[in-house]
Image (cartoon, rainbow, N blue to C red):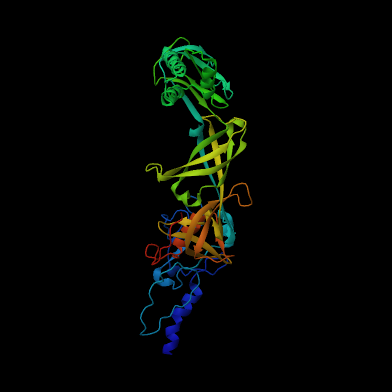
Amino acid sequence: MKSFSFLVPALLLLVGLPACSKKGGHQVAGDVDYYTCTMHPSVHSKDPGKCPICSMDLVPVMKKDASASGGDGHIHSAVETPGAPSAPAPQKPSEFTVPIERQQMIGVTYAAAERRPLEATLRTVGIVEPETQRVFEYVARVDGYVDKLAVSSPGQMVKDGEVLLTIYSPDLLATQQELLEMLRTSGSSDRLVESAKRRLKLWNVSEDEIDQLLKTRKASEFLTLRSPFDGIVGSVSVKPGMSVKVGDRLIGLMDLSAVWLWAEFYENELPLLSTGQKIKITVPAFDDEEFGGEIAVIEPSLDPIKRTVRVRIDIANPQWKLRPGMFVNAWLDVRAGEGLTVPVSAVMPTGIRNLVFVDKGEGRLEPRFIDLGRKYAKLGARYNSEFYEVRGGLKEGERVVTSANFLIDAESKIQGALKTWGTEESAPKAPK
């Protein structure tokens, strides 16, 4: 008789406690603490009904001593063994139930954790610059006056060996006459002759012009400057008749058959970069025409403000379409093997931990903390979305919620599924 009276409260609890399914039993009025809205937890009502804010059905919140299930809507044990100590509160999130009809109403979708290639497309922008080795600046090496100017303005195309300008220089005339006098004097040493020739070369007199001087024995007061390569005029700093002194800038030239692109990548993308990687360049000015490039230099230091690293990309430019200062896009495809992945939308960051809701079937969901790796995004292929690498906490094929996560999270809290949200003993790494 004593044991029967002891089991009566337990049987009443088994019959009376509600399931979260729409088809579940009725709640015992004494077990319900209050009614609230899953969208607006601040709403408290003593009687069931509609939410005054959004008109959703209010759900019951059970009294703490009315449920021993941890919030999954089913009673596991309502009878304590006499004399046994109370069981400690669960330290991990437990299952809870959201009816399938409610999931459909709030737009819950799922995706399976699956293995796939860890591929990403890194996109950045940059500005075209001429190669340092392909830029030539003529500077006056002798005093004189500009006699003739063969180029008129920046942008003019010139050929290798084409005349750019001539300079009238009395000093040049005197040095040539000195050399010819040495050659006529039989007592002059070869050392003095070579010294005079070297002085002419330092003044930008070419070998051919020196040979012509020695052959004709006629000195000239004009210095002719020619283009050292096929290129384009970058700057013209003189005018006909202008006086020039040693060190004055005259004409700047550029060879644009190959150019540089200086681009910036974020700090967390640095491990995916290496010299020699091929990169695609698209140019908005030419309707996104594609050019091929290659990473040549990765600077050793990062920008302390933007947290980016500068990367030099070498680009072949045989048709000279790319010009200095032009804005372009750079696309780098990288691959880091294969791994287990979930969509980015499935993950709820909670500080240093990352939470997903795992589908257990028939409306049951399990909140689970997982360990994430790097975030990837492959564009223009099968997977045209962002996803995380999963390093722990999920198995291949398990389904996770990918939309309406915050509504599911609110539902789980109301049902008491996450009792120790801030006291989880393990803390997986945050996503990179």
The number of numbered discs placed on residues in the rendered structure image is 0
View extreme (front): residue: 186
Is 254 placed above or below 425 here?
A: above
User: Residue drawn 47% across and 52% down?
Assistant: 271
Viewed as shown, does residue 423 lie left or right of 253?
Answer: left
Q: Relative to the observer, which residue lies in front, 17 or 30?
A: 17
Q: Relative to the observer, which residue lies in front, 199 or 387?
A: 199
View extreme (top): residue: 241
The quarter of the picture where residue 349 lies is: bottom left
Q: Is residue 420 visible?
A: yes
Is 43 placed above or below 302 here?
A: below
User: Residue drawn 47% across and 25% down?
Assistant: 137
Can you give x and y, in whole percent of width and height, for residue 147 in the image? 48, 11
Is 74 placed above or below 203 here?
A: below
Can you give x and y, in whole percent of width and height, for residue 282 in the image? 59, 37
User: Residue drawn 45% across and 87% down?
Assistant: 4
Can you give x and y, in whole percent of width and height, for residue 255 in the image? 55, 29
Q: Is residue 49 visible?
A: no
Q: Relative to the observer, which residue lies in front, 211 or 90?
A: 211
Is 239 placed above or below 275 here?
A: above
Which quarter of the image is occupied by the N terminus? Answer: bottom left
View extreme (bottom): residue: 1
User: Residue drawn 42% across and 84% down?
Assistant: 6
Can you give x and y, in whole percent of width and height, for residue 374 in the image? 49, 55
